Image (cartoon, helix red, strand yellow):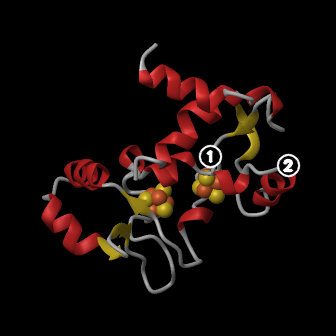
Amino acid sequence: MSSSNSSKNNRTKGHKQKWYKDGLRFECQRCGSCCRGEPGVVWMSKKETKNTSMSLGISTDLFTKDYVRLINGRISLLEHDNGDCVMYDKGCKIYETRPSQCKTFPFWNSNLGNRSEWEEQKKTCPGIGKGKLHTVEEIINRLEPELSDL
Ligand code: SF4
Ligand code: SF4
């Protein structure tokens, strides 16, 4: 068995016991609520900065100079003074190459501890409970591990 299969099996071990074993519905409504307002951090990997700068048609150096800051050695997108993400303008300007942190929202460990945590997120994210049913395997195998690449 390859190490990637082994790692995958470890991640899915016990998935039948997860409170969301029957999957969770989520479909982004593009409301922009998670991109605006409150200050926060949006982590990016070096690969993501490279892909995003290419999608914007600028050099990685220019992108790094104008759009990100370093926090404890990690890359995060800048925000405007009002807390809006620098990439937000009536929608995400880099939607196709947006960082994993954005792609995986709201399937973050911090929102998946129990049903209450998930339901709480509905107050700020109208996509929760709507649209596509994401299976527990999808949530565990595809969504959560993306964040570990940062
Ligand atoms: S708050 Fe939810 S529905 Fe609105 S843009 Fe963010 S992920 Fe999409
Ligand atoms: S990168 Fe795009 S999706 Fe992520 S917070 Fe900024 S505007 Fe929103």
Q: In terms of depth relative to the viewer, which is nearer, 8 or 30?
A: 8
- SS type, badge 1: loop
Q: Position of residue 60 (x, y in %)?
A: 17, 59
Q: Would you name the residue on which mark 2 appears?
A: 115
Q: Residues within 10 Å of mark 1 (few under 14, many from 20)?
A: some
Q: In terms of depth relative to the viewer, which is nearer, 96 or 8?
A: 8
Label 1 residue near ligand 1, CB within 8 Å: yes
Q: Residue at x 56, y 39 (%)?
A: 143
Cα separation between marks 1 and 2: 19 Å
**Above or below: residue 105 compared with residue 145:** below
Q: Residues within 10 Å of mark 2 (few under 14, many from 20)?
A: few
Q: Residue at x 44, y 65 (%)?
A: 88
Q: Residue at x 83, y 53 (%)?
A: 119
Residue type at numbered disc 2: Arg
**Above or below: residue 1 compared with residue 124:** above
Q: Would you name the residue on which mark 1 appears?
A: 28
Q: Position of residue 66 (x, y in %)?
A: 23, 74
**Above or below: residue 120 compared with residue 27:** below
Q: Residue furthest right?
A: 116
**Residue 91 visible to an observer of this rendering:** no
Q: Is residue 32 left or right of residue 97?
A: right
Residue type at numbered disc 1: Cys
Q: Residue at x 38, y 68 (%)?
A: 76
Q: Position of residue 85 (x, y in %)?
A: 45, 70
Q: Nearer the viewer, mark 1 or mark 2?
A: 2
**Residue 48 visible to an observer of this rendering:** yes
Q: In terms of depth relative to the viewer, which is nearer, 74 or 134?
A: 74
Q: Position of residue 34 (x, y in %)?
A: 59, 63
Q: Residue furthest top?
A: 1
Q: Is residue 51 left or right of residue 43?
A: left
Q: Earlier in the sequence, mark 1 or mark 2?
A: 1
